[in-house]
Image (cartoon, rainbow, N blue to C red):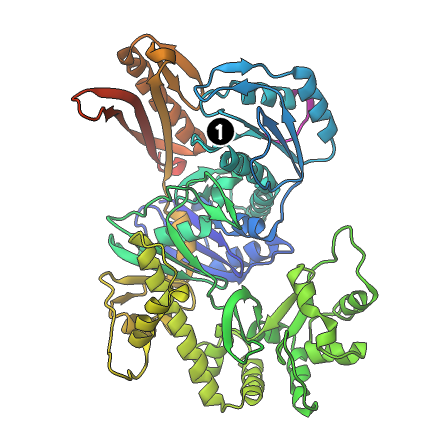
């Protein structure tokens, strides 16, 4: 009997589970707050709460995480130098340091101009001690990787830092997207290294000797060394793990899986036990990549979403994430006393902050000295979080004049405020943290907008439920290839609002029926999803262990690698050319090309799945010829043959 430990490091919580590999049962589970300033603290606390007696039986530790996704969104990561071969940038780049090198391939991968080694050496020397990693992207490298591989070899000979080629990460056409993918991959190397190293140190402290694997964005697993080279493949890792967890815990092969966390709600359509892979690649933080990821719809709606009234007096929920007042109030009791003084203040009007907002120090800005006012704010927060009006009194300024939102946007300070989690504490559906400060904030909010506490609570509950319903309906529309946005379509909003009304009015009564059950996972779903599924007339399934489903998904994943190669006619239709991730090769006949290519791609896929961390595996190979027909004739012209090999394996512990 062996155990697998699954750990999910999310934006709010770090979840952990231990699974028995023989019975597939969850032996223990735990949650701890994620400690971004030092990941070891949260991971160690989570493992400690697992209360596992026999750590020697843990044979594998699997990690899922949102750290890579969040780093891209927030613009964090390592310093990267980018070497472009044969063409300059075709759009914005996620890096500042880049060089364009000579060397040219045509679209068929034929060398038209060789690289200049002296130029490569000069570019590399100019990057020495200025970057943590180097990315290399050459035009048409997916047709022939020769230039990228030569430049990579020179970099490795001169610098002792990670270097990655674009063709190693993507076999798809699209020079700009492939370049962005390689640059982001290099940026994320220190982020994933930090997670792996923190996990290793914690495991050592707990005397757990086991290999580490990470969940990729498509839900499959890869071993840690592969993840350090290709951290870009961990983007959307957390949502992918949640899908696996939802399927595993319910054994439902056809369902919508909804994962509600602190920051987002992620929704996936499971058909025949799997989820489609995005055709265009994952899009994160405004960057379109060539990284494979599951087709998941993500909405800025979670347990830690910012509840506030805008300048027009309208209730807003998210998409900003804040620390819930109830969580901060348990750690910092002074905040309760500070909020109690608000009622004694005279009339005031706030436009950019809320009366119950509190703030905490995160970090000083890099390479920029804060102004006198901002410096005083940071000094006031050195001893711990404080409320908006406490800071205003301490600094002798009007609350709005502090311009705290600007410091929040820059990541210098963080906001503590009202969230759906606070509302659950007030209505009695959740009591893990300090409900007193949540009730106090609700009273302040209700008084401000001229409502009773029950009226305000009903407004928030109704609004949050409606937004969750709309998120489900928007996801379904996208899964059915509809491109409209509900909130930007007046007709769609009219019918949906009619269907979601608590009491229907007017001439028209409408309703929706979702024809699949919703598998809901995540800590808050038991409080919110019954009302949602009631309005959508569908079955709600909340499995046991739903609150740690991401960690469960991490523990039960498989190792999967898919490789694609293309055979096309040669120049002047003479001969045939294989374009593969590892080489470009010319053959006299199509039969010769296939005879060579099929075993070669299967072996390449096998080597890749073994390097990724699989023991036992199987390979599925398919190939298809494509022709076009000439109009008005029966003639067909050969275009290409696409060969695809997918290696599916179990993690090494199964072998």
Magenta region: 157-163
Residue 89, given in percent of the width and then of the height, sits at 59, 34
Is residue 206 in view from this perspective? no
Is 98 magenta? The answer is no
Taking depth in this image into account, of 506 and 4 the one nearest to the observer is 506
Is 162 magenta? The answer is yes
At 62% from the left edge and 45% from the top edge, which residue is drawn? Answer: 77
Q: Which quarter of the image is occupied by the C terminus?
A: top left
Residue 419, given in percent of the width and then of the height, sits at 52, 73
Question: Where is 243 relative to 588, above or below?
Answer: below
The image quadrant that residue 460 belongs to is bottom left
Question: Where is 17 relative to 571, above or below?
Answer: below
Instruction: Tell me: 398 left or right of 431.
Output: right
Residue 348, given in percent of the width and then of the height, sits at 68, 86
The image quadrant that residue 444 belongs to is bottom right
Which element is circle 1 on?
helix
In the current view of this chain or complex, which residue is farthest to the top? Answer: 588
Q: Which quarter of the image is occupied by the N terminus?
A: top left
Instruction: Tell me: 115 left or right of 51.
Output: right
Q: Which residue is mark 1?
A: 168
Is residue 452 in view from this perspective? yes
In the current view of this chain or complex, which residue is farthest to the right? Answer: 372
At 45% from the left edge and 29% from the top edge, which residue is drawn? Answer: 611
Residue 605, given in percent of the width and then of the height, sits at 37, 27
Taking depth in this image into account, of 375 and 639 the one nearest to the observer is 639
At 59% from the left edge and 47% from the top edge, which residue is drawn? Answer: 198
At 46% from the left edge and 60% from the top edge, which residue is drawn? Answer: 30
């Amino acid at each position: 009997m062996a155990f697998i430990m699954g750990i999910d490091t999310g934006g709010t919580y770090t979840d952990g589970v231990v699974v028995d590999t023989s019975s597939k049962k969850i032996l223990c589970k735990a949650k701890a707050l994620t400690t971004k300033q030092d990941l070891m603290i949260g991971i160690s606390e989570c493992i400690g709460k697992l209360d596992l007696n026999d750590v020697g039986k843990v044979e594998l530790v699997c990690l899922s995480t949102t750290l890579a996704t969040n780093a891209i969104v927030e613009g964090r990561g390592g310093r990267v130098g980018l070497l472009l071969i044969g063409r300059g940038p075709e759009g914005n780049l996620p890096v500042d340091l880049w060089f364009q090198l000579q060397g040219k391939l045509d679209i068929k991968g034929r060398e038209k101009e060789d690289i200049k080694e002296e130029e490569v050496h000069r570019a590399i020397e100019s990057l020495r001690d200025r970057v943590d990693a180097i990315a290399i992207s050459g035009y048409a490298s997916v047709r022939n990787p020769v230039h990228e591989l030569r430049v990579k070899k020179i970099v490795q000979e001169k610098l002792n830092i990670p270097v990655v080629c674009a063709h190693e990460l993507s076999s798809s056409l699209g020079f700009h997207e492939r370049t962005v993918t390689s640059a982001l991959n290099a940026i994320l190397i220190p982020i994933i290294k930090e997670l792996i190293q923190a996990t290793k140190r914690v495991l050592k402290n707990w005397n757990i000797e086991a290999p580490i694997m990470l969940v990729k964005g498509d839900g499959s697993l890869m071993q840690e060394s592969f993840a350090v080279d290709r951290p870009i493949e961990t983007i959307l890792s957390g949502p992918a793990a949640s899908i696996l967890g939802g399927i595993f815990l319910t054994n439902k092969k056809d369902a919508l899986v909804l994962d509600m966390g602190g920051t987002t709600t992620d929704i996936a359509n499971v058909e025949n036990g799997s989820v489609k892979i995005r055709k265009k690649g994952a899009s994160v933080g405004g960057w379109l990549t060539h990284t494979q990821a599951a087709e998941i719809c993500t909405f800025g709606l979670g347990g830690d979403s910012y509840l506030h009234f805008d300048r027009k007096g309208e209730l807003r929920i998210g998409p900003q994430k804040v620390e819930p007042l109830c969580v901060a109030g348990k750690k910092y009791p002074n905040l309760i006393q500070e909020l109690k003084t608000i009622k004694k203040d005279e009339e005031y009007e706030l436009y950019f902050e809320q009366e119950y907002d509190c703030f905490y120090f995160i970090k000083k800005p890099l390479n920029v000295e804060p102004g006198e006012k901002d410096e005083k704010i940071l000094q006031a927060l050195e001893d711990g979080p404080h409320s908006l009006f406490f800071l205003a009194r301490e600094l002798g300024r009007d609350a709005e004049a502090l311009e705290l939102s600007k410091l929040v946007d820059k990541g210098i300070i963080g906001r503590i405020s009202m969230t759906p989690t606070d509302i659950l504490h007030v209505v009695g559906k959740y009591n893990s943290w300090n409900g007193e400060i949540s009730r106090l904030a609700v009273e302040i909010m209700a008084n401000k907008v001229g409502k009773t506490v029950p009226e305000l609570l009903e407004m928030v509950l109704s609004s949050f439920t409606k937004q969750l319903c709309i998120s489900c309906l928007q996801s379904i529309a996208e899964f059915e290839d509809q491109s409209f946005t509900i909130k930007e379509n007046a007709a769609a909003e009219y019918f949906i609002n009619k269907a979601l009304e608590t009491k229907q009015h007017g001439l028209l009564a409408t309703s929706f029926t979702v024809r699949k059950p919703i598998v809901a996972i995540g800590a808050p779903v038991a409080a919110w999803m019954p009302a949602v599924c009631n309005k959508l007339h569908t079955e709600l399934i909340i499995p046991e262990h739903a609150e740690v489903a991401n960690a469960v998904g991490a523990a039960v994943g498989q190792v999967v690698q898919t490789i694609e190669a293309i055979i096309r006619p040669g120049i002047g239709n003479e001969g045939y050319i294989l374009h593969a991730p590892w080489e470009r090769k010319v053959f006299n006949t199509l039969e010769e090309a296939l005879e060579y290519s099929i075993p070669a791609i299967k072996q390449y896929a096998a080597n890749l799945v073994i390097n990724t961390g699989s023991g036992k595996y199987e390979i599925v190979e398919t190939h298809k010829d494509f022709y076009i027909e000439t109009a008005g004739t029966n003639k067909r012209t050969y275009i290409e043959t696409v060969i695809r090999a997918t290696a599916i394996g179990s993690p090494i512990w199964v072998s």
